């Protein structure tokens, strides 16, 4: 009876301070501040005619001005057209790659898949620089070579164009991302479904046409919609290639509004709001579509198909095609980026001593470089570690049956998905300007790290959530019954078991923080400038060769990271 | 409804009108029972009946919505008084259906975990883990990775982990359901031996009637969140108080008819004018003309060669015969109902054969319908 008395005494505390409830409420509060508030500031701010930090005057003038400007409307259309134009070739190529890797007897499929992972992590900014060096109408190597031909009288290639942007995107991460997403889908398509069709008398082509593709079409469509939405958020390539030609998408337009003297925050937020609403509607439809297609989850079917389509002689041709696509779209630009970083003037091979180490020496001699390197490593480390700690707990709360406000938390976790980097940066900038948070975060590495961490929220939370669901509740409950508190269980059971996931998302977020430009571009100051921004500054101020050197350095960092990840046994291909 | 046993025995676990709902759906519907020290108490029922929820309520993995749970006389959960003792503070041992062996820890570390949580000294941990592993017959495997074990070995590790700190109650949640038939039989025997040796108090959850029958001191038949009947295996098998209890534990044959009684005798009238006399106590409360269900165990119904019918016999025809190796299974139609009976191999009846079914009036259960 003694125990009864003691437990009775503490009952009030126990009921009120249930740890999971505390975690839930604090997470919701956190997300509300770092995602909800910026979003609100963006939308409300678009009606605010006063400069940030000053007392608000509300009106429609920002909207009127923004949409009376024909370039604003055309920027929105351009975002849409560009995203569609790059989507179609990318999906076709990705489906072919995924099918060849997963469903045919093409040799070297695993190596190709691993390479797709590597290529996915090549940052798009250096890649764009590389294509500029190859295709620039004045000094681009391919143009110079083409002009040697007798019948060519004008430079045939121009990267500063609609199709130039599409072309560069066809070589950058987006396409490899689709391959990475689709290959496991192709691989896991329940073998029995195809075998049943075969037993029923269908031949290879009929099976492909009548069973495989119809079964996979919802997934392919889902990947396409996701890619389309991500395409709308693109910034780097459009900034480098579109701006010189006067091609603006909404993200470069916002960048332009903010970088004007004086900055037009009002128009920027008005444009951002329209975009957020459009994107929100698209994502909602996408989510609805995915839900209605739940019944198509045959991709998680039990039996893996071991029977592959025999390509015969064609398998070597297919391999050659894959290898040459990768070589042309990823290796070739990188090689010429390396060459470019060692050339006195890029493309000028005929001058005296065309090669020089000057750009690398300048880079390493620049004190700003070391400051930026330190900033970047700090930002990336903070982003990755804090993200793991925070989102692993958020995912835990989401899978827990005891969470009463799970839908609210989940919505807040997903919110950054509709906030492209530039808008997230803008919203968080407003948050810093309008609240006391500015003393810690405004223009500091902490502010940048916070913004990057927020942008990682959907994917990281999702990864941990999948991990928890796969673990099941038993392992945790066994520890609780054995006498371990939640904290002890989390440290000794859950975190070690989720270490592979934590490692994988940690590396991804680290790499993302290292290469992100659009998120920190509105938030950095001279003291907190990260490497990627330094690279942008070099590139837009005419020091393309030094920018190339820095781009290569960042790419090398990412590659080393990926190799370490692979060495640590992180899963980079579905076959392992 | 209460199934308390004698008041003198020390109660290790007690439920008082415990209620648990999930999103308004009732899972445990006001259950009261108690488990005595050194007893194996089994919750037996179909899946979704609330037996696992009951076990999880004991473990502290679920919070009850009403009622009170006491462990060794102390209240561990009483929502009306705001009492809820967390799982880790209840000093229980639990074996999960999936075993829940932590894959990143060795066998030794898995078993040592409860001791490490309690900050036991190095020597105590070494000694108690060795002892626990020996008890379950895994003495040589301490340094193995947990994932290198077979299902049966994992089961033993889970058992050792649950026993290593001498829990007040050992909770077993369908511990044998993932093992193959041979191993299941062996583990059943070992669990029983272990329980006797260590005089453990065990709360056992299963849907398998053989496990329940062979392991339990007492069985609670659980159905839709309620206890239908609590008793020794023999009591429940021989004298099921509800049709559910009778049908779930063991097989039954069922005949429907109308109850008749006269001052001298009572019987059930079946279709086609057949009648079966009954003389069980439960029939006393029935009125003449009540619609009833007559239930018997198949082994209590004899299949006899055709002859003159006696009063306790029915005429029947064989519709199907299945050969089961050690016996025959007959599908027999009598009084309009299809009955499944078994018979030893020495008797053999062909499909279509006319037979007699002999009932034992004392071994029939009767329920109104």
Image: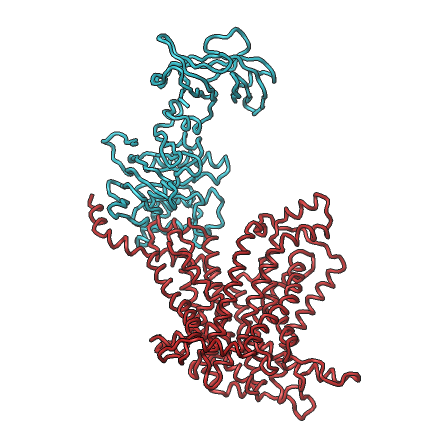
Chain colours: A red, B cyan
Can the viewer see residue B76? no
The answer, for residue B102, to whether it is visible in the render is yes
**Where's residue B58, x and y in %?**
33, 42
Up/down of A379 relative to A315, above or below: below
- Quadrant for residue B324, please give it: top right
Q: Is residue B347 above or below residue A444?
A: above
Rendering quarter of residue A431: bottom left
Q: Quadrant of residue B201?
A: top left
Instruction: Determine whether, in the image, residue A298 is placed left or right of residue A18.
Output: right
- In depth, the one of A359 and B29 nearer the eye is B29
Viewport quadrant of the N terminus of chain B: top left
User: Which residue is found at the position 42% from the left and 19% from the top?
Assistant: B291
Identity of the residue furthest to the right in this view: A150
Compared across the picture, whether A348 is left or right of A264 comes to right
Task: Name the spot of residue A169 as percent of width and height, x first.
Answer: 61, 72
Percent across and percent down for residue A229 are 55, 66
Residue at 52%, 68% (x, y): give it: A564
Q: Quadrant of the C terminus of chain B?
A: top left
């Amino acid at each position: 009876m003694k125990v009864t008395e003691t437990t009775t005494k503490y009952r009030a505390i126990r009921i009120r301070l249930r740890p999971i409830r505390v975690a839930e409420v604090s997470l919701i509060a956190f997300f509300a501040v770092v995602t909800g508030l910026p979003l609100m500031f963006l939308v409300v701010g678009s009606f605010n005619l006063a400069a940030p930090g000053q007392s608000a005057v509300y009106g429609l003038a920002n909207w009127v001005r923004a949409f009376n400007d024909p370039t604003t409307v055309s920027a929105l259309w351009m975002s849409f057209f560009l995203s569609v134009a790059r989507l179609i070739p990318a999906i076709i190529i990705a489906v072919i790659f995924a099918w060849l890797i997963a469903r045919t007897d093409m040799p070297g499929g695993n190596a190709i898949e691993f390479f797709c992972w590597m290529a996915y992590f090549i940052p798009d900014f250096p890649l764009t620089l590389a294509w500029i060096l190859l295709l620039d109408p004045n000094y681009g190597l391919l143009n110079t070579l083409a002009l040697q031909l007798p019948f060519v009288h004008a430079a045939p290639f121009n990267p500063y164009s609609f199709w130039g942007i599409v072309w560069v995107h066809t070589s950058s991460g987006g396409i490899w991302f689709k391959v990475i997403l689709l290959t496991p889908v192709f691989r896991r398509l329940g073998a029995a479904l195809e075998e049943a069709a075969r037993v029923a008398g269908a031949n290879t082509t009929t099976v492909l046409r009548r069973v495989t593709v119809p079964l996979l079409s919802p997934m392919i469509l889902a990947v396409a919609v996701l890619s389309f939405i991500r395409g709308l958020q693109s910034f780097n390539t459009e900034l480098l290639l579109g701006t010189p030609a006067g091609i603006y998408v909404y993200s470069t337009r916002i960048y332009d509004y903010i970088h004007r003297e004086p900055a037009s925050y009002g128009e920027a937020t008005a444009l951002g709001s329209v975009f957020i609403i459009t994107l929100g509607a698209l994502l909602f439809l996408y989510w609805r579509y995915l839900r209605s297609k739940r019944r198509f989850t045959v991709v998680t079917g039990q039996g893996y198909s071991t029977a592959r389509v025999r390509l015969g002689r064609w398998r070597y041709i297919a391999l050659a095609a894959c290898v040459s696509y990768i070589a042309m779209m990823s290796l070739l630009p990188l090689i010429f980026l390396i060459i470019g970083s060692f050339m006195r003037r890029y493309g000028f091979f005929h001058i005296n001593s065309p090669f020089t180490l000057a750009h690398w020496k300048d880079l390493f001699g620049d004190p700003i470089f070391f400051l930026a390197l330190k900033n970047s490593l700090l930002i990336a480390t903070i982003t990755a570690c804090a993200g793991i700690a925070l989102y692993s707990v958020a995912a835990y709360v989401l899978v827990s049956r005891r969470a009463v406000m799970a839908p609210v938390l989940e919505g807040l976790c997903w919110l950054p998905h509709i906030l492209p980097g530039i808008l997230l940066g803008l919203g968080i900038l407003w948050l810093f300007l309008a609240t006391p948070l500015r003393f810690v975060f405004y223009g500091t590495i902490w502010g940048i790290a916070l913004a990057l961490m927020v942008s990682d929220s959907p994917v990281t939370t999702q990864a941990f959530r999948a991990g928890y669901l796969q673990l099941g509740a038993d392992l945790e409950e066994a520890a609780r019954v054995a006498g371990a508190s939640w904290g002890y269980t989390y440290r000794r059971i859950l975190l070690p078991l989720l270490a592979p996931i934590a490692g994988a998302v940690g590396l991804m977020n680290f790499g993302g923080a290292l290469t992100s430009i659009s998120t920190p571009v509105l938030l950095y100051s001279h003291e907190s400038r990260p490497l990627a921004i330094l690279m942008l500054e070099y590139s837009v101020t005419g020091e393309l060769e030094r920018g190339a050197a820095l781009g290569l350095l960042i790419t090398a960092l990412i590659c080393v990271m990926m190799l370490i990840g692979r060495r640590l046994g992180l899963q980079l291909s579905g076959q392992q | 409804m209460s199934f308390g046993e004698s008041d003198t025995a020390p109660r290790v676990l007690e439920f008082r009108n415990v209620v648990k709902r999930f999103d308004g759906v009732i899972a445990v519907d006001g259950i009261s029972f108690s488990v005595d020290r050194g007893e194996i108490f089994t919750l037996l029922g179909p899946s979704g009946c609330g037996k696992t929820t009951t076990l999880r309520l004991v473990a502290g993995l679920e919070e009850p919505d009403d009622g009170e749970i006491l462990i060794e006389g102390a209240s561990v959960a009483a929502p009306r008084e705001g009492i809820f003792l967390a799982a880790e503070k209840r000093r229980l041992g639990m074996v999960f259906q999936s075993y829940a062996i932590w894959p990143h820890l060795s066998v030794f570390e898995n078993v040592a975990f409860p001791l490490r949580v309690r900050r036991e000294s190095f020597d105590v941990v070494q000694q108690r883990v060795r002892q626990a592993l020996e008890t379950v017959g895994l003495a040589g495997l301490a340094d193995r990775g947990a994932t290198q074990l077979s299902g049966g070995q994992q089961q033993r590790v889970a058992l050792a982990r649950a026993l290593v700190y001498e829990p007040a109650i050992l909770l077993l949640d369908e511990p044998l359901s993932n093992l193959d038939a041979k191993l299941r039989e062996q583990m059943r025997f070992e669990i029983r031996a272990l329980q006797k040796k260590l005089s453990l108090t065990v709360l056992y959850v299963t849907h398998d009637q053989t496990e329940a029958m062979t392991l339990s001191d007492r069985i609670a038949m659980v159905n839709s969140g309620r206890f239908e009947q609590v008793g020794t295996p023999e009591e429940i098998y021989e004298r099921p108080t509800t049709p559910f209890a009778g049908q779930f534990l063991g097989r039954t044959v069922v005949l429907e008819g109308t109850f008749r009684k006269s001052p001298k005798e009572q019987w059930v009238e079946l279709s086609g004018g057949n009648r079966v006399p009954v003389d069980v106590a439960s029939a006393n409360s029935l009125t003449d003309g009540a619609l009833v269900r007559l239930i018997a165990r198949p082994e209590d119904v004899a299949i006899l060669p055709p002859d003159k019918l006696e009063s306790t016999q029915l005429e029947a025809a064989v519709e199907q015969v299945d050969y089961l190796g050690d016996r025959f299974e007959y599908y027999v139609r009598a009084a309009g109902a299809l009955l499944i009976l078994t018979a030893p191999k020495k008797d053999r009846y062909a499909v279509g054969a006319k037979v007699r079914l002999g009932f034992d009036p004392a071994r029939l259960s009767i329920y109104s319908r």
